[in-house]
Amino acid sequence: MEDYQKKMEELARTLMRQILKYLATSEEEMNWVGSLGGASTALQLNSYPMCPDPHRAMGLAPHTDTSLFTILHQRTSGLQILKEGVGWVSVHPVTRALVVNIGDLLHILSNARFPCVLHRVVMKEPKQRFSVAFFYSPPVDFHLYPLALSSGQIPLYRSVSVAEYVGKKAKNLDKALSSIRI
Ligand SMILES: O=C(O)CCC(=O)C(=O)O
Ligand SMILES: [Fe+2]
């Protein structure tokens, strides 16, 4: 497990660097990743027991993750994401592939260019489900705000510390993002 967490930390840092490059973040703002050496990470093992009548079983209620992003390992079906204009779409496991779910903090940081994804777990099959979620976030005292705005682009969100945002999310799950909207 420790080894897996270390590998995920390396992967998350690489991904974060690529995302910031894609967003055309300035040199100064890029230093931000350096400071993510002290990123806050968590590994969560999820188990969804088998239910003989899957129609009566609830997996995981719809939510967005509070992280920058979450790297998910899954071997059985059940995960669904909400696709705008389409509805709930299943994300089936692919051998040797990981799923990356964008969370609220990257949504804010990227000024909604990397939108967070609403997802849930449904237990349609009479089969136990396991998943391993690696949450990648800045340190709790970190203040984040929309980065890499070109001239004329307006920030959609005000600056917020990770701790403040986590508090808002705990109080008001689905209204946290809109509560910091400018
Ligand atoms: O089990 C899953 O695939 C979803 C887990 C998840 O969304 C979470 O832990 O936040
Ligand atoms: Fe999640």
Image (cartoon, rainbow, N blue to C red):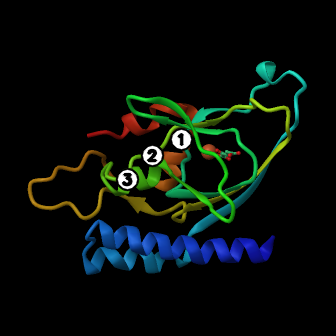
Q: Are marks 3 and 2 in contact (CB under 8 Å)?
A: yes
**Local crowd size for mark 2, using a 10 Å CA cut-off: few (<14), some (14–19), many (≥20):** many
Residue on which disc 1 sits: 64
Any atom of ligand 2 within 8 Å of the CB at mark 3?
Answer: no
Any atom of ligand 2 within 8 Å of the CB at mark 1?
Answer: yes
In the rendering, at what x and y percent does residue 92 appear? 64, 46
The amino acid at mark 2 is Cys
* Tag of residue 116: 2
Quadrant assignment, res 91: top right
In the rendering, at what x and y percent does residue 59 appear? 74, 32
Which of 160/43 is in front? 43
Q: Please give left or right for residue 79 compared with residue 171 in the image.
A: right
140 versus 172 height, above or below = below
Any atom of ligand 2 within 8 Å of the CB at mark 2?
Answer: no
The amino acid at mark 3 is Phe
Q: Are marks 2 and 1 in contact (CB under 8 Å)?
A: yes
Q: Please give left or right for residue 116 compared with residue 55 in the image.
A: left
Q: Quadrant of the C terminus?
A: top left
> Sequence-wise, which precedes: disc 2 or disc 1?
1
Q: Residue at x 81, y 24 (%)?
A: 54
In the rendering, at what x and y percent does residue 151 appear? 10, 60
Q: Secondary structure at mark 3?
A: loop
Q: Residue furthest top?
A: 56
Residue on which disc 3 sits: 114
Q: Residue at x 39, y 47 (%)?
A: 115
